[in-house]
Amino acid sequence: MTTKQEVFNTVVRGLRKQDAPSIGATAPGLPDVQLGNGCAYRGKGGRRCAVGMLIPDDEYHVSMEGQNVALIAESSPTIHDIMVDVGEKFLCHLQNVHDDCMRVEGVFNDMVANSFRAIARDNGLEYPE
């Protein structure tokens, strides 16, 4: 069983380390072929969005791009199990932080940190430093 704290830690640490949002998915094997400019589970430069941090490479497929968490769970056993353990609403909340913060250039990490601290407080979680 996966806990909210484990999921939260993975997402927070992953987004902090990458220091930028995941946008503009690329076609597998064709890094110069961009599929869009919005949030991407797998984006340019190997970046990942909040839920993308949780999708194992062997379960990812470009057809996931543009799909919501519930649809991703249908093709990713890992996301399905995490969603059962922590709830779709919690995963969507993490994803929304990424998507909302990516729209303001230059302050992504600060905005994400503030939003994730609020999620930690509201869910009784520790914010990983």
Image (tube, rainbow, N blue to C red):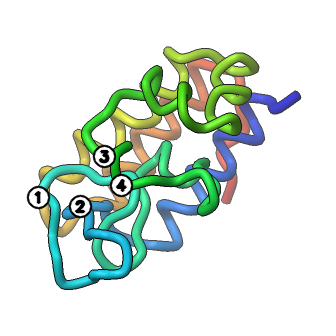
Dot in front, 3 or 1: 3
Image position, residue 24 (x, y; %): 19, 63
Please give the name of the residue rendered at 18% of the width and 84% of the height, measured from the top-left corner: 32
Q: Seen in the image, is 28 located left or right of residue 14?
A: left
Dot in front, 3 or 2: 3
Q: Nearer the viewer, residue 17 or 71?
A: 71
Q: Amino acid at mark 3?
A: Glu
Please give the name of the residue rendered at 48% of the width and 30% of the height, measured from the top-left corner: 118
Mark toward the start of the polypeptide (1 vs 2): 2
CB contact under 8 Å: marks 4 and 3: yes
CB contact under 8 Å: marks 1 and 2: yes
* Residue 23: mark: 2
**The N terminus lies in quadrant:** top right
Decide: is 43 above or below 117.
below
Q: Seen in the image, is 101 located left or right of residue 34?
A: right
Mark toward the start of the polypeptide (3 vs 1): 1
Image position, residue 77 (x, y; %): 68, 34
* Residue 62: mark: 4
Few, some or many C-alpha atoms within 10 Å of disc 2 (few <14, some 14-19, many ≥20)? many
Instruction: Determine the secondary structure under disc 4.
Output: helix
Residue tagged 3: 65
Q: Amino acid at mark 4?
A: Val
Instruction: Determine the secondary structure under disc 1.
Output: loop
Spatial separation of the CA atoms under disc 3 and disc 1: 11 Å
